[in-house]
Image (tube, coloured by chain):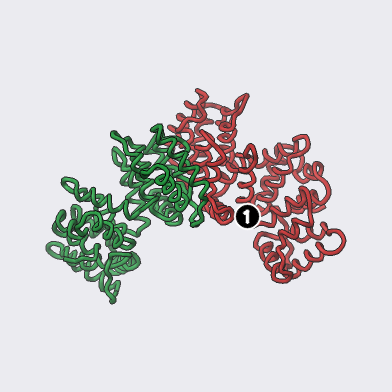
Chain colours: A red, B green
């Protein structure tokens, strides 16, 4: 369930006018921006952008970019984008870093449904005039490339049917590779990049039944390299997205200095989807609510905005 | 341009009745089947199947399968399927052979537009409850797998813009790998599986300008393995589909015994698309028309059917 709270009354024109007022004159009225945009869904935000463009012949996203700054600006910018376009931007930003954030690529390719992933790939081509896999391949090499290109290119079967015998034999294949610490074995990559999510869950369950520990625990090593980290992330995203996001949030918050990029990414991308369930996972695991943790670790307009998306206005 | 010739008048019900008559009583009237189905496009054939099902509560495709035999049956069966579904069947048949026909997989993934390839992948999942890349990966290994999974998973950028500097540098990368006979170099696979077709054509042109020979000539080796054959096929399909199909037809025809599978595949899959241009290529290269060659190498109903699809009824 979404955490986003939307009022009953909505008028794109009124919102556009309010946002215009918030941006005009001395200083920006950030509270007003949070009040409006922090309570509108993707379809409404799109209508607001269109109304704003019609009324003032100006791009709302760009105007807000110039009015705001820091983490707040980044969060509002990402929030304003259409979800698929936002993922395209997140992927591109992740790839262009001097050491690419491969986990963002893994996240996008493993969390989405096969159809959703295609929409992101289409948005990527539209925005960057290159394919997502093209940029992924150009910014990676060796086994990581093989894994990432496979994950990004996958168009998995969505059915819930599973083949128990296959789960059994492929759990053995995985264990055999992991036992010998050959995480980058071709068969490991094949299984993780091509099998349906339902089939993979059956395989991972079988692995745990046979070995007494989860596959992700078995892949933990003392000095993880890019490949083993990406593989673990993929398995966690495929296996249990909510638990995965809980951990990303937990790590982002407990980091000295807070990882605002990760915090923003998860809250902005999940607020309209399943952030309520992720909040539940978070509470279960940390005995403190996500709202409280976010309130404690952030401040100012950024904090107000995140709390609005979390459904907990100050 | 399509080679298929369609009459002005069309009635799905009349055609269904005609086909029913052709199948009933002593012996099948194959000529009637050719006369009807050899002159209907994919949308019409679908309507005929639906009308037949409604009228006779029987599946036309299955009924024809039981009435016909040999190469004729195979050709009619393939022709009756929706194009994307047909490609799914062709891919599956190719993969299930004891030594898989990788060139069929390469053909399907490199000839189609990115959107068309997605439709084939969707049809594959619908029919087989597995993804195409899943079956490709399960029926291949090593470098061939890497290449094929990359080709099948690609969702290339379709724009015509090219980056000349990139074409230049990647032509060098390709030449460097080929010079050292490392065809399976990761960078070769990356370039061929991810770049847009327009960009690849620019790169292959640049290669030819720099080296004085085409890249496909340079990949020819005395004892070709699966990988070098698949790579050459991919480059030829990406570079010039019509020339590629001309060669497939030429090889199929000049083979002692004729390769009916390849002959049927190309004629059935291209009759509604660009078989006229392929015929032109064939004539240019062989100084004899494709119709004449096909008439010479085939016989009976199979011959009549292929000639109908070629737009040259006997």
**Picture coordinates of residue B79, whole percent (x, y):** 28, 59
Chain of the residue under label 1 = A
Check disc 1: other Cα within 10 Å, few if <14, some if 14-19, many if 20+: many
**Residue drawn at x 84%, y 59% as measured from the top left:** A29
Kindly indicate the quadrant of the structure image that contains residue A258.
Answer: top right
Answer with left or right where residue A113 lies relative to residue B244: right
Answer with left or right where residue B278 lies relative to residue B69: right
Answer with left or right where residue B51 lies relative to residue A113: left
Answer with left or right where residue B308 lies relative to residue B159: left
**Residue drawn at x 26%, y 59% as measured from the top left:** B279
Which one is in front, A26 or A77? A26
**Picture coordinates of residue A1, whole percent (x, y):** 65, 52
Which one is in front, A257 or A167? A257
Kindly indicate the quadrant of the structure image that contains residue B273.
Answer: bottom left
Q: Secondary structure at mark 1?
A: helix
Question: Where A165 falls versus B311 (above or below)?
Answer: above
**Residue drawn at x 36%, y 45% as measured from the top left:** B214
Instruction: Check disc 1 and report the residue beneath it.
Output: A83
Q: Residue furthest bottom?
A: B9
């Amino acid at each position: 369930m979404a955490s986003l709270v939307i009022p009953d009354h909505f008028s794109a024109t009124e919102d556009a006018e309010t946002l215009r007022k918030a941006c005009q004159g001395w200083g920006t009225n950030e509270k007003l921006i949070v009040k409006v945009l922090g309570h509108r869904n993707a379809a409404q935000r799109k209508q607001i952008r269109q109304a704003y463009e019609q009324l003032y012949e100006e791009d709302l996203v760009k105007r807000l970019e110039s009015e705001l700054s820091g983490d707040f600006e980044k969060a509002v910018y990402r929030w304003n984008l259409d979800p698929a376009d936002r993922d395209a931007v997140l992927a591109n930003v992740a790839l262009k870093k001097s050491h690419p954030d491969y986990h963002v690529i893994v996240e996008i390719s493993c969390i989405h449904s096969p159809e959703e992933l295609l929409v992101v790939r289409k948005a990527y081509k539209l925005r960057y005039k290159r394919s997502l896999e093209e940029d992924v391949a150009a910014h990676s090499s060796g086994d990581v490339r093989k894994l990432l290109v496979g994950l990004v290119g996958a168009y998995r079967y969505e059915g819930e049917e599973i083949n128990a015998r296959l789960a059994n034999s492929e759990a053995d294949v995985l264990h055999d590779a992991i036992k010998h610490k050959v995480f980058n074995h071709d068969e490991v990559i094949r299984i993780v990049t091509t099998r349906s999510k339902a089939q993979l869950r059956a395989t991972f369950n079988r692995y745990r039944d046979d070995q007494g520990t989860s596959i992700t625990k078995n892949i933990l090593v003392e000095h993880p390299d890019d490949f083993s980290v990406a593989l673990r992330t993929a398995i966690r995203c495929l296996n249990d997205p909510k638990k995965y996001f809980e951990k990303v949030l937990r790590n982002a918050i407990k980091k000295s200095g807070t990882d605002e990029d990760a915090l923003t990414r998860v809250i902005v991308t999940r607020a309209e989807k399943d952030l309520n369930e992720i909040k539940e996972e978070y509470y279960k695991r940390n005995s403190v609510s996500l709202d409280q943790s976010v309130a404690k670790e952030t401040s100012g307009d950024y904090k107000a905005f995140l709390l609005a998306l979390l459904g907990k206005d100050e």
